[in-house]
């Protein structure tokens, strides 16, 4: 019997389950997870979202119950997104600044019922605009106007924070928005409200199911509305670092990369370039593709879910926004 004369046999550290646990380098825990939730107006039952199996558009009373359940399962944070009635959407998205708009009522209700649950709100105009863009058009109608949009976002952030949001999360990718939000929050006396900045947000086709969920696809007439003049080109690593550095200097408390799975190199680059906490958003399309393949019997949903989250953690994320949060927390409870 021939034997290799080997000094190094790395398989020794993989020999038994106990050894494998001892040498394990990374793990995802429930503490790392943030559950995104959608909210609609009304008092009745939640609506299912066809392209996101298991995810709902909650009415405020059912959203509150869901948040209680998530908190009971050990989930520390939720990110809430409103789906507006199409009649409330306009060219300039003014409903975003209505002091009684849906998201504000939802945040107040959740914070009243579960004060310890961290509530994150999205700051962007896409749920409110009739064209589905994250901002307002310039006078000529040729592009999204940066500074005009930032002004509205700053007001929106203050309203969200006053309603009780712990973090406001600008997801619009306008220039200078983090600084403008910080100034507006501080001037309003909201120095404790954090900014979780979507810093490296790419112009991704993986947002399709989310655009169904909030109705921005219906408003725009397509899932694939081009946001390339503000979201990052998926080809660019260095440009992502420019964006994250600016957000850090402008006063962001947490930096986010989005999508997550297809952008692990960006998460790793960021980990090596910042000491701030890093969030990663495993987006709707990443969730939908695993469900679709599992439905066909081609992939094991739970194992792919766990592997995808572990990879995001290993790349360097501290926290993960994922639609799988509740399922993972339930499984951890056994
Ligand atoms: C909107 C926003 C989007 C997502 C979060 N905030 C979509 C977009 O930019 O069109 C996507 C999240 C997901 O796909 O799960 N500003």
Image: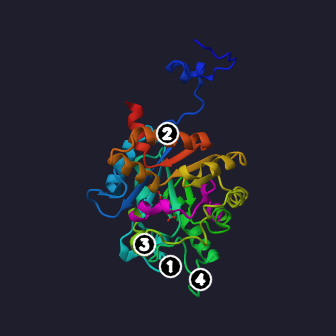
- Circle 3 Cα neighbour tier, 10 Å, few/some/many (<14 / 14–19 / ≥20): some
The residue where tag 2 is placed is 307
The residue lying furthest to the top in this view is: 1
Sequence-first disc among 3 and 2: 3
Callouts 3 and 2 close, C-beta under 8 Å = no
Cα separation between marks 4 and 3: 22 Å
* Vertical order, 152 against 262 (above or below): below
The residue where tag 1 is placed is 92
The residue where tag 4 is placed is 138
- Circle 2 Cα neighbour tier, 10 Å, few/some/many (<14 / 14–19 / ≥20): few
| Quadrant assignment, res 153 | bottom right
The secondary element bearing badge 4 is classed as loop
Cα separation between marks 4 and 1: 10 Å
The residue where tag 3 is placed is 222
The secondary element bearing badge 1 is classed as loop
> Where the C terminus falls, by quadrant?
top left
Magenta span contains residue 186: yes
Residue 108, disc? none
* Vertical order, 8 against 258 (above or below): above
The secondary element bearing badge 2 is classed as helix
**Does mark 1 have its CB less than 8 Å from ligand 1?**
no
Where residue 331 appears, as percent x and y from the top left, is 39, 34
Where residue 166 appears, as percent x and y from the top left, is 54, 52
Where residue 236 appears, as percent x and y from the top left, is 66, 60
Sequence-first disc among 2 and 4: 4
Magenta stretch in the rendered image: 184-212
Position of residue 277 in the picture relative to residue 141 (left or right): right
| Quadrant assignment, res 315 | top right
* Vertical order, 184 against 318 (above or below): below
Cα separation between marks 2 and 1: 41 Å
């Amino acid at each position: 019997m021939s034997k290799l004369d080997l000094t190094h046999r790395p398989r020794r550290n993989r020999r038994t389950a106990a050894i494998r646990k001892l040498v394990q380098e990374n793990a995802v825990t429930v503490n790392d997870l943030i559950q995104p939730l959608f909210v609609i107006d009304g008092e009745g039952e939640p609506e299912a979202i066809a392209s996101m199996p298991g995810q709902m558009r909650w009415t405020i009373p059912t959203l509150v119950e869901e948040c209680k359940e998530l908190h009971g399962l050990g989930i520390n944070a939720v990110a809430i997104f409103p789906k507006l009635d199409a009649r409330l959407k306009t060219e300039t998205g003014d409903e975003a600044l209505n002091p009684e708009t849906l998201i504000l009522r939802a945040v107040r209700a959740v914070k009243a019922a579960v004060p310890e649950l961290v509530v994150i709100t999205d700051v962007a105009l896409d749920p409110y605009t009739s064209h589905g863009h994250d901002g307002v058009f310039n006078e000529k109608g040729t592009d999204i106007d940066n500074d005009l949009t930032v002004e509205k976002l700053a007001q929106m952030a203050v309203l969200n924070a006053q309603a009780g949001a712990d973090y406001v999360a600008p997801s619009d990718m306008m220039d200078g928005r983090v600084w403008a939000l910080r100034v507006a929050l501080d001037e309003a006396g909201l120095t404790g409200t954090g900014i979780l900045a979507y810093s490296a947000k790419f112009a991704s086709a993986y947002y399709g199911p989310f655009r169904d969920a909030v109705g921005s696809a219906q408003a725009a007439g397509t899932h694939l509305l081009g946001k390339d003049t503000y979201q990052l080109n998926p080809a660019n690593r260095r440009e992502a670092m420019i964006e994250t550095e600016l957000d850090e200097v402008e006063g962001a408390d947490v930096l986010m990369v989005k999508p997550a799975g297809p952008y692990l190199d960006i998460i790793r680059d960021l980990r090596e370039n910042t000491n701030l906490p890093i969030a990663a958003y495993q987006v709707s399309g990443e969730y939908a593709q695993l469900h679709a393949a599992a439905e066909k019997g081609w992939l094991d949903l739970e194992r792919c879910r766990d592997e995808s989250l572990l990879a995001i953690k290993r790349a360097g994320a501290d926290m993960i926004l994922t639609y799988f949060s509740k399922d993972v927390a339930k499984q951890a409870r056994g």
